[in-house]
Image (cartoon, grey):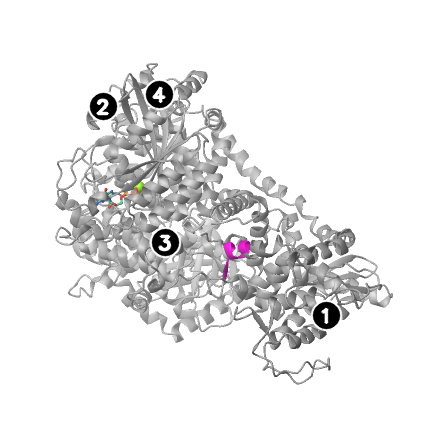
Amino acid sequence: MADAASGSTDKSVQVKLVLLGEAAVGKSSVVLRFVSNEFQPNKEPTIGAAFLTQKCRLEDRVLRYEIWDTAGQERFHSLAPMYYRNAQAAVVVYDVTKASSLEKAKSWVKELQRQANPNIVIALAGNKVDLVQSSGASSAGPASPESEDEADDATATPGETPGSSGTEPDSLRQVPKEEAQAYATEAGLLFFETSAKTGEGIVDIFTEIAKKIPLEHILAASRGASGRSGVGRASGTQQEAVNLQEDANKPKDACNC
Amino acid sequence: MSTISTALRNFKEPTKEQLTQIFFSLPTVPSDLSENASEQPEKMEINAVLSLGDGEEDSYAGKLHIMPPYLAFTSLDRKSVRFTIPLSTIRRVERLNARAGIYALSLLTWHGMKIIVQLTSLRPTADLFCSMLRDSLKVELQKGHMKLVKSFVKTCYSEELVSSSSNVADNEREDGSLISEEKENPVPRESTYHGGLGLKFKFPGDPKKLRESSKIKLWTTYLRTHGRNLTLMRYPQCTRLVQVGLPNRLRGEMWETLSGSIYLRFSNPGYYERLLKEHDGKTSISTEDIEKDLHRSLPEYAGYQSEDGIGALRRVLQAYSFKNPELGYCQAMNILAAAILIYMSEEQAFWLLEVLCDRLLPGYYAPSMHGTLLDQRVFESLVQRCLPIIHDHFQAVDVQLSVASLPWFLSLFINSMPMVFAFRIVDCFFCMGPKVLFQVGLAILKINGEALLQIQDDGGFLNLMRDYFANLGESAHPQSADPRARAITRFQELLLVSFREFSVITDETILSERKRFRSEIIHSIESFSKRAAVRNLKTLGRFTKEQAGLIYDALYKAMCIVPPPPTVAPPPTLLTTRDSGEEKPETRIGLRTFQYFLSEVATWARDEKIVMNGFQQRVDREVAEHEFIDRLFFFWDIACRGALSFQDLVSGLDGVMFNDLMENIEWFFNLHDKNKDGYLTKDEVLTLSESFLFIFRYEVGDAYLGAVSRFMTNAFEYGDALLPQPESKPGEERELLSPPPVASNQPYLNLATFRMVVLADEILESFFETDLSASFKLQPLPEMELPISSGGLLGDIWSTIATDSNKKMFNMFTDEIGKTIGKHQVVHKPSIGRYTKLEEPKARESLLTPAMRKSPSRTSLVSVSESTVAPTVSAASTSTLNVTIPTAESNKALPVVPDSAALSALPMIQAANAALMERTPFAIDDAKDDADDDDFFADDDDNDDDQVMDEVDAFLEAHDSGLTDADKKVANDLLHAEPVK
Ligand SMILES: Nc1nc2c(ncn2[C@@H]2O[C@H](COP(=O)(O)OP(=O)(O)OP(=O)(O)O)[C@@H](O)[C@H]2O)c(=O)[nH]1
Ligand SMILES: [Mg+2]
């Protein structure tokens, strides 16, 4: 509840981030993992867009992500500009078990690069890697305590067959990591494979984005627009700030902004 | 990879008759039962005064409509009283014996309810009405529809309620004749009524808190005296009972009754089951999308954690997508379907979904979601008018209203606020129509007005809304000293504000606002999809984005005029999983549309006649048809799909519009080399010549004709000369008809030879050098007329005059006069127009010395051609241009129109503003200040029934029966009148 950010300490920077990607690739799940470190096997499809916030501590400064999680179905596409306008960062999500979702992701990237804020930082996330890893192999991430079996039999994810541990799980993979990586490099995107279910790679996306974002720039801009009183009501969904250093157990250099 | 839809262009404003149908919730689709009647049944309306047989209610003046197979009534104010009943529920009609000059009928329904209507129009009109009523009833009887009623009402819970509680006999009425009749057959009642998942998995909310039993009691009383399901009479009490929340068990049926979907179910028995059976096992993009969302629809409700619920949801959504494949499935429909399935059976839900998508939320879920966008725009404009301070603040801090309001409208608040509250809004929505969404939306903003003025960005707005919705169950006035005021919840406050302060928002307001913004929305959707289509091209070729946009415009126009068949996804077997670029449905056009498209971009693909008749000069344009165009179509269809995509067109045009001389010659050669073996057969040489003749058909003078005949001569001469076969003698004869040395379908002429032949002729050379490429022209098209959407008188008149057929008539008329006065003149517009005089260049002496015949060097030929052709170019461009002006003129009268729509909306808005002036903006009403609120809650907290009644009273509005005291007396007398013998 005690929302330090709304007291607008000078170090807190607001970053507007938008999630885009085909329906059911796991955008909302990625956000939920990042914001509340949970996973719900059956999340309702997003209608229009959902809005969540999460603070991140990065070195000496606090970042406040304002996350716009959009609807994925094609026909909601024309609404997207409403949400990505003025966004400083975007996470474009695809599903590693569904080749077409990468195509959709590419077209989002293209649209963002032409239509959105020119300095936008874009990350590409290949979600649901847990489905293509042999069981128990996933090591990273703060695996949530809730039972994963329950998730398994309830998810409507195509191709997710119960008892997939016996079969060779990699056959589910339709997008090779190398292919996506190559595309991301070429298009100048950050790239991660993630699992909202296990937590793998989730925090990393947001950390790397935070590092890449020209924070000084934003700070200057928002100072210009003074009178921004902290009315963004502390809502119940706000968690304590994620400590990025801890979660992504890597030594962090000072951010390169 | 894009789909292009012209559906928005086909929108037509509803006619007055359709509006009446919509008002009475009548099915607009031809139902199974009435389809054989090819002639439209006659309709009629008449002034009438309605009274109910038991005299419990006031009488109301209004209009009685007969619209077979329905009879409908609305009071003059169009809101106090109304009904729509199928004629087949009427068992007897009697003329009542009354005072002189009074013409009254008594209608007896199947369950014995007596409806008395006094026909107050002139006598002949009343007679006519009666005879129509009699005839229509006869028709219903003959069709056997009367018999269907009894079995249908068994599916309705209300019947159960009315008859079973009369057994309970808690409070009988004295006039209980009809009720006791019912009591006589207490058949061992196995429950045959339809119900939803709630019967098995419980309904959301605490029944005690919802005061279910009191509500059921009130409804039972009401339904017993006012009809139910097919025969429900909607009096003010009905609306009020709905406003305090429908009881769970009755909710589903009341939804279908109030929305009118019950008439669809009634008139299409077995349709749902058949539809499912017919499409059993079929898959589509929609069914795939549905599958993804089945487990993501109200997942917290127990019913959807079981196969019962998931299966029902799947069937209902799929059935709808089969019924309306163009709409298919849109996310948010799963939420609605899941919600209504808690309260109703699959079949009921299917028809209700149909009414929702079709009539109540038109265009909301369409692929373009134009209805959603339109209503968001309408909502914004209403906010601007009704809550200008909030609107201005939102503008100032650049907050978009729709970030919050779009999901409200799209899923009827169901995933914005706790379900129990959302369902109460849905109750009102089905009862009072789509305006409820706007009223509630405005009320939400008004109630939160002060806080909204503090927000600084979209995020703050959404957070505020989320907090507000999360606390709807809290007291609206927690600080108040008055316990009754404290007891008012925020939700109750919301409804009161919605219906009291925003009652000025009527159906008419919404309709006229939609008209006002429709073309704006269509334009923005279209330009958005155009940008997306251009962006999604795999390659632009050498075109700029703007040029690709022009190609898109031509394609779009062609699709408007010759709509391509609906896109069908290729069978899944043809899809390789990796080739994901093709998985998306892509709009492709067939040959007919292509012909039209080409006529927009290529001068020779249209027949243009310049008509002068002394009154006007115009260009009549027709699409040309020729094998050459078909050939081009298949030439560009690289993937051999028999249809072309936007990309195909762009690439195809790219392949010809930027060519130089040599490339054009090769392009033309390849176009005619069907089997792509590098040789033309003799037949193909002939077809190629025909293509020339087609392209040149309107050129002035004989120059081109000469060129083509020289071409043929030369082609066969050199063709024969260069034949590989040794035995063919180098024939001297040059006639075309000389016996062919090779079969007409054998390889004959290769590219090199073709090139030589072409370059032997100055005219053909210049054709390939510049004219061919230049005959493709990408020009901005004049703005296409949208379907006229202004409501004003002027607009209506114009749109009736300016139809295409009227323009044609005008043209014909002036042509006739022109002919009489000898001024009628028709000139074909040439496609190339290089030679405007009859002078023609001399045939060039053959450039081809026999030495060159073997291998013409490309470079040498190029230099020759350049020097000869250059001077003529400018002539070509001037002569083609000057004719387009007259057509443009005839379209120009339009821009006057749109303003009149704004005018018609004004009175409503003024009324709305006037209503708001009386209150201080954003003040949250304290119950104590408002006299109406005083008896909002009864003092006795234990008495649930009274509480509900009080709540009901809170919704009391003044209802005007439209009758004088004398009128009322007459109506009252009729209640006791005897039938005429
Ligand atoms: N196994 C697995 N399932 C996941 C993962 N992320 C999401 N899902 C499941 O995929 C489904 C879709 O997830 P959502 O987060 O709702 O997807 P979305 O992209 O927000 O979908 P829309 O809102 O419709 O655009 C849900 O059933 C999730 O449980 C993941 O990392 N692993
Ligand atoms: Mg989502």
**Quadrant where the image shows the C terminus of chain B:** bottom left
As drawn, is A195 to the left or to the right of B15?
left
On the same chain: label 4 and label 1? no
Question: Which residue is denoted by mark 3 in the rendering?
Answer: B580
- Which residue is rendered at x = 31% and y = 34% of the image? B492
Q: Which residues are magenta?
A: B644-651
Residue designated by label 4: A13
| Total labels drawn | 4
- How crowded pointer 3 is (Cα within 10 Å; few <14, some 14-19, many 20+) is rated as some
Q: Which residue is mark 2?
A: A251
Q: Judge left or right: residue B804 versus residue B880.
A: left
Q: Is residue B356 above or below residue B628?
A: above
Is disc 2 on the same chain as disc 4?
yes
Q: Chain of mark 3?
A: B
The residue closer to the viewer here, A117 or B947, is A117
State the CA–CA distance, disc 4 to disc 2. 22 Å
Q: Amino acid at mark 4?
A: Val
* Residue A46 shown left or right of residue B851 in the figure: left
Asked if marks 2 and 1 fall on the same chain, the answer is no
Q: Amino acid at mark 1?
A: Val
